[in-house]
Image: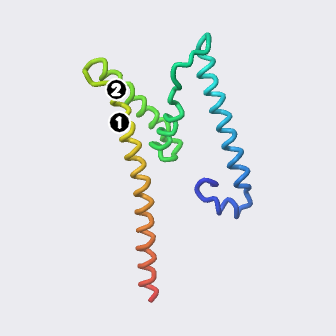
């Protein structure tokens, strides 16, 4: 309720600022524990080669799922399918596996453009309906 309509949450008496801060701190704590487990717990000693891009993957899955928790597993499976497909293609042909980065960038650009354009379209619909209401009222 706070993310979609903060004014309504304030009106209903919820502490929006404290709840948002608490949820951000809790999410950061859980992500930190997961990152520490990933970096320190999987090997017999600390080996820093490169940071895994799991944070970016989470952002990409959330963007593809359009803030719908039911679509998160579908988006994650789609992302895994694209990555495994890139590995298979790189092993069986001369196409480099880095092509998946280009595909991921295109997916993020298309999802972001759709979100951006949907806001513009919503504003146009609201303006048109206000004009229609003014015309009927006169």
- Residue occupying the point 66% across, 33% down: 30
- Residue occupying the point 65% across, 62% down: 8
Give the mark nearer the N terminus: 2 vs 1: 2
Q: Which quadrant holds residue 38?
A: top right
Mark 2 near mark 1, Cβ–Cβ under 8 Å? yes
Image coordinates of residue 138 in percent, x first then y, are 44, 89
Quadrant of the snapshot with the N terminus: bottom right
The mark found on residue 86 in the picture is 2
Answer few, some or many: residues within 10 Å of disc 2's Cα (few below 14, many 20 plus, some between 14 and 19). many
The mark found on residue 39 in the picture is none
Image coordinates of residue 136 in percent, x first then y, are 43, 84
The mark found on residue 103 in the picture is 1
Q: Quick check: 17 left or right of 51?
A: right
Image coordinates of residue 133 in percent, x first then y, are 45, 80
Answer few, some or many: residues within 10 Å of disc 1's Cα (few below 14, many 20 plus, some between 14 and 19). some
For mark 1, give the secondary structure. Answer: helix
Image coordinates of residue 40 in percent, x first then y, are 63, 19
- Residue occupying the point 65% across, 63% down: 7
Specify how the rendered protein is coloured: rainbow
Label 2, label 1: how many angstroms apart (C-alpha)?
Answer: 10 Å
Q: Which quadrant holds residue 97?
A: top left
Q: Quick check: 106 left or right of 6?
A: left
């Amino acid at each position: 309720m706070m993310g979609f309509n903060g004014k309504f949450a304030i009106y209903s008496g919820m502490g929006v600022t404290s709840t948002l801060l608490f949820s951000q701190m809790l999410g950061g704590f859980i992500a930190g524990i997961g990152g520490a487990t990933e970096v320190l717990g999987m090997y017999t000693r600390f080996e820093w080669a490169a940071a895994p891009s799991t944070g970016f993957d989470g952002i990409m899955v959330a963007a593809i799922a359009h803030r719908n928790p039911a679509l998160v597993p579908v988006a994650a499976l789609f992302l895994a399918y694209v990555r495994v497909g890139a590995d298979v293609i790189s092993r069986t042909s001369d196409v480099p596996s880095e092509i998946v980065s280009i595909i991921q960038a295109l997916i993020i650009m298309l999802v972001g453009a759709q979100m951006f354009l949907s806001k513009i379209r919503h504003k146009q619909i609201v303006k048109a309906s206000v004009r229609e209401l003014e015309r009927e009222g006169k």
